Image (cartoon, rainbow, N blue to C red):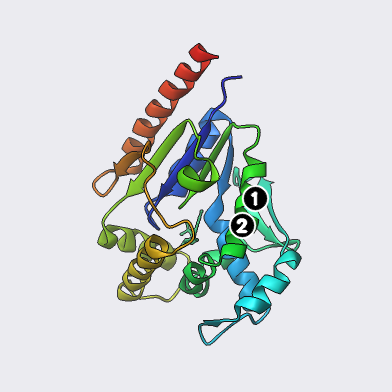
Amino acid sequence: MGKITIAIDGYSSTGKSTIAKELAKVLNYIYVDTGAMYRAITLFALENKCIENANIDHNKLIDLLPEAKLKFQFNRELGYSEMFLNGKNVEREIRGMPISKEVSKISVIPEVREKLVSMQRKMGKKKGIVMDGRDIGTVVFPDAEFKIFMTASPDIRASRRYKELISRGEKVTYEEVLKNVRERDYIDSNRLSSPLLKANDAIEFDNSDMGLKEQFERIHYYALQVIEKQKKNA
Ligand code: DC
């Protein structure tokens, strides 16, 4: 009763998923990380040799797409869902640099977007969902009751991402991560199919100078207000 749809969009490494995950937990909503879906399709493309020397064989990938079966499976210990590609847990693999380097190129392909957007709409049919990505408030759920658009400076995002990758044991340089953040910003914002845009009715949230606790408290407060309003109008 009174459940809403929460869309969290924004630039890469703005901490969307951390906030979205926490929000879903306290509201007892489903959490969907749509970036994980684009990352899993990128892994599928690499495994099936649809990407070679950074070139994408679009026709081959489009032909093979029906064979890419994605599934989120809830992990009780971790408290969130992990991504499975054709029955295999790929959660760790899809977060590394090899996937980050190619994912923006895969997510410009309209056939890939069509497949994933249709899955996302099915997952959110009953509301009670927090979904994060790039086009959730504009394309996937334009009628979402609560929309947030997260931003932060590229330097801050690169430094957060760099720390995360290093803590996972990846060998990367800060410059390499910053270059990847900038490239993804450019491709995500300039692609023809569903570019990264702030929805007119989304709240812009710059978290460059804000810790996680403060971000969460503010967003949670806004969300509760929208849910209350929804209940009154029901
Ligand atoms: O949120 P993320 O960094 O894990 O997303 C990985 C890439 O997937 C990102 O560079 C753009 C793409 N993406 C997208 O195009 N649409 C979405 N809804 C989510 C992600």
Residue at screen point 48% across, 65% down: 168
Residue at screen point 40% across, 58% down: 12
Q: Is residue 219 left or right of residue 93?
A: left
Q: Quadrant of the C terminus?
A: top right
Q: On residue 118, which mark appears?
A: 1
Q: Quadrant of the N terminus?
A: top right
Q: Is residue 132 left or right of residue 60?
A: left
Residue 111: percent from left, percent from top: 62, 64
Q: On residue 229, which mark appears?
A: none
Q: Are marks 1 and 2 in contact (CB under 8 Å)?
A: yes
Q: Is residue 62 left or right of residue 31?
A: right
Query: In 3D space, how far apart are the residues under numbered discs 1 and 2 (Cα atoms)?
Result: 6 Å
Residue type, numbered disc 1? Ser
Residue type, numbered disc 2? Glu
Residue 8: percent from left, percent from top: 45, 43
Q: Is residue 29 left or right of residue 148?
A: right
Residue 137: percent from left, percent from top: 46, 43
Q: Is residue 209 above or below residue 196?
A: above
Q: Which residue is mark 2?
A: 114
Mark 1, ligand 1, within 8 Å: the answer is: no
Residue 115 at least partly seen: yes
Question: Depth check: 63 or 86 in front?
Answer: 63
Mark 2, ligand 1, within 8 Å: the answer is: no
Question: Depth check: 208 or 67 in front?
Answer: 67
Question: Depth check: 181 or 51 in front?
Answer: 51
Residue at screen point 38% across, 60% down: 189
Q: Quadrant of residue 69?
A: bottom right
